[in-house]
Image (tube, rainbow, N blue to C red):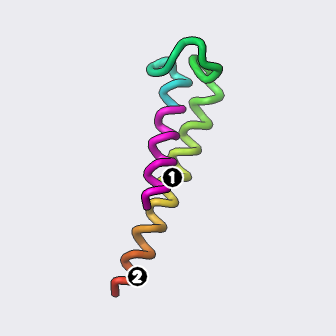
Amino acid sequence: MIVGSIIFILGIIFHYQGKSVIGPESSFMYANPEWVTIGIQIAIFGITILASGIFIKFIKKN
């Protein structure tokens, strides 16, 4: 679950760097529309891992 949370947060950061909201202007991701899409995909992957961890923990508990 921790890994999924970290991946989700990184995806959000990449998304906002691609939209020119955060990050240094010298970054190759800054204002790059490709990284908006990649960031969303990484965030979805992180949510999937997080949800899997929660599901596995719930199954083991019962």
Residue under the image location 49 percent in, 20 percent down: 23
- Within the image, what quadrant is residue 25 found in? top right
Furthest-bottom residue in view?
62
- Label 2: which residue? 59
Q: Would you place residue 1 above or below residue 34 in this image?
A: below
Q: Position of residue 4 (x, y in %)?
A: 48, 55
- Mark 2, other Cα within 10 Å: few <14 / some 14–19 / many ≥20: few
Q: Residue at x 34, y 87 (%)?
A: 62
Considering depth in this image, is 2 or 49 the residue closer to the camera? Answer: 2
Task: Look at 46% across and 48% down and name the residue there.
Answer: 6
Q: Which mark is residue 27?
A: none
Name the amino acid type tagged 1. Answer: Gly
Work out how far the residue at label 2 is from the one at label 1, CA to CA, in angstroms. 20 Å
Direction from residue 62 to residue 36 in the image, left or right: right
Q: Is residue 5 above or below residue 18?
A: below
Q: Nearer the viewer, residue 28 or 18?
A: 28
Give the magenta part as a residue range: 1-14
Residue 46 circle label? 1
The residue positioned 57% from the left and 45% from the top of the image is 42
Position of 51 relative to 10 (above/below): below
Amino acid type, callout 2: Ile
Q: Quadrant of the image for the N terminus?
A: bottom left
